[in-house]
Amino acid sequence: MSTKVPQNTTDQEVDLAQISKAIGRFFDRINTSIFRLIHFFVQNWILALGIILFGICLGWYLDTAKKLYNNEIIVTPNFGSVDYLYSKIDLIEAKIISGDTVFLKDVVGISHPKTIKKIEIKPISDAFGFVEDKELNFELIKLMAEDGDVNKVLADNVTSKNYPHHNISFITNKLVDEKTVIEPLFNYLNSSDYFKGVQKTVIKNLQQQISQNDTIIVQIDNVLNGFSNTVKNTNKNDKLVYYNENTQLNDIIKTKQFLVNEQGKNRLQLLTSDQIIKEVNSSLNIKNTQSINGKLKFILPVLFILLFVFIKFFNSFYKKQKQLTSI
């Protein structure tokens, strides 16, 4: 066994030496490649500089000529019009893809339809708004979540379409304003005769409910004032008065609190019911910097230089191989 140990040690030293030499040759090849690349640019610096300047100028021109802008509108669909809203936005997108500028101009009312390149609508995730004071919605989410992930349920099309707010986003190649795009778009979305009829009925019902609740609140106040006066008179006469639990005084107070809260919600709903599709907020003309938009002035010079280097090295490789073949 002792005679095998030195042999193994020698083999290991030979292997390490070979590895060291291989690593050295590898770094030598890297140094040679770097030197050749530097030497290549030294020899062709004028042409390389011209290519870089050409790429910068061309990229700058394309970035200036082909600007894109993101535009977003947050909306609230009223009177159960969410599916109607999505179908209208999908129709507009289909017309943009097909290039039907006549529809966009005459039906939708957009004066410069070619400026719009894309439009889409997505729900704004608001699980709390979906289940707030809506026990049925909460139970629905619990039921759907029993067989799957809660996050998937909240993002599901059936659930997300019933969120109170939705985001309409569209891309344009020019600056736009409220009058040229937003107003015509909302005039088109709010032109449904069916939902106009629903709107009138809902507003009328809200007004009646507000009026009736106000009357009931006044009646409750009269009852409470009468009770308060009775208590004051009793204290003046120094007499004890016992009230039976069946007076339901607590129920009356709770009823008033409920009606006051309901009145606040009704008035808020009445305020937001002036349109079928209600605009909440809009952000226009946000410069689109996604993908290569606005970056061509940096991308094209690098791309042209790489292409130039590839062509030169390919030409050199071809000539060497041709000489070898001819020999």
Image: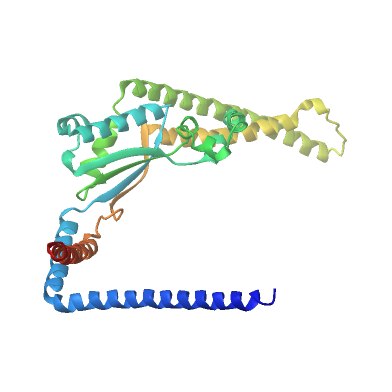
Instruction: Tell me where residue 4 appears, x and y as whole percent.
Output: 64, 74
- In this rendering, would 165 be left or right of 115? right
Instruction: Tell me where residue 228 appears, x and y as whole percent.
Output: 73, 36
- In this rendering, would 43 be left or right of 139? left
Nearer the observer, 285 or 236: 285
Nearer the observer, 142 or 284: 142
- In this rendering, would 82 be left or right of 7? left
Image height of 88 relative to 287, above or below: above
Image height of 32 relative to 98, above or below: below
Instruction: Tell me where residue 183 appears, x and y as whole percent.
Output: 26, 39
- In this rendering, would 68 be left or right of 31? left
Nearer the observer, 154 or 305: 305
> In which quarter of the view is residue 273 placed?
top left
Instruction: Tell me where residue 107 appears, x and y as whole percent.
Output: 20, 29
> In which quarter of the view is residue 240 placed?
top right
- Name the residue at 18% across, 39% down: 113
Nearer the observer, 313 or 75: 313
> In which quarter of the view is residue 74 placed?
top left
Residue at the front extreme? Answer: 3
